Image: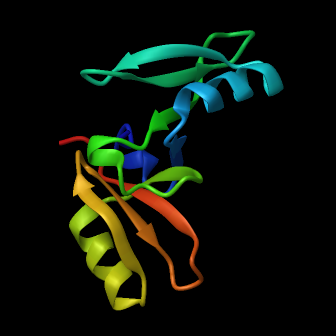
């Protein structure tokens, strides 16, 4: 997920959860929250956009911890738009943070010095 434009810098652009058992967790949130799953083809399997019941607008993602996502921790991750991904990654490291996945696809998952995790996303080119 990428921030939509330069004005989106600093805004939470997306949220998703990456787990080994995405089918089970998809069903859990469908029953508990009321989200409707929509498959997103990932090659040999599908992740899911979870849509709000009233508008069908995507609210969040539920993804499998497979392939490129195998290292993503099993927790809700927010995606925040940044002006310059490389600069933000460098500052993260300088400030005592850690890169735990990426950068890839315009995003990078980091852990801050307190242990909290979020994803940084560059605006589209």
Above or below, comparing residue 59 to residue 3 in the picture: above
**Side of 13 relative to 50 (left or right):** left
Q: Residue 49 at what x, y percent from top left? A: 51, 23
Identified at 57% across, 78% down, the residue is: 115
Residue 102: x and y in percent read 26, 59
Q: Residue furthest left?
A: 125
- Image quadrant containing the N terminus: top left
Q: How many marks?
A: 0
Look at 70% across and 19% down and name the residue there. Answer: 35
- Quarter of the image for residue 52 reads top right
Left or right of 67 in this view: 47? right
| Snapshot quadrant of residue 67 | top left
x%, y% of residue 90?
26, 79
Q: Image check: 38 left or right of 122?
A: right
Colour treatment of the image: rainbow
Residue 84 in sight: no
Residue 76 is situated, as x and y percent measured from the top left of the image, at: 60, 50
Quadrant occupied by the C terminus: top left
Q: Is residue 34 left or right of residue 63?
A: right
Depicted 3 relative to depicted 92: above or below: above
* Relative height, residue 95 to residue 103 (above, below): below
Visible residue check, residue 78: yes
Task: Say which of 82 and 111 sits in front.
Answer: 111
Question: Most extreme residue toward the right, as rendered?
Answer: 32
At 67% from the left edge and 22% from the top edge, which residue is drawn?
Answer: 27
């Amino acid at each position: 997920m990428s921030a939509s434009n330069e004005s989106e810098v600093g805004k939470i652009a997306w949220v998703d959860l990456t787990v080994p058992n995405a089918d089970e967790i998809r069903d859990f949130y469908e029953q508990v929250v009321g989200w409707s799953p929509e498959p997103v083809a990932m090659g040999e399997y599908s992740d899911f956009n979870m849509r709000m019941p009233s508008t069908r607008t995507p609210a969040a993602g539920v993804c499998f911890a497979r392939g490129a996502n195998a290292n993503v921790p099993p927790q809700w991750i927010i995606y925040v738009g940044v002006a310059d991904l490389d600069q933000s990654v460098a500052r993260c490291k300088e400030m005592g943070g850690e890169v735990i996945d990426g950068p890839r696809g315009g995003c990078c998952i980091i852990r801050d010095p307190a242990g909290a995790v979020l994803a940084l996303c560059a605006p589209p080119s």
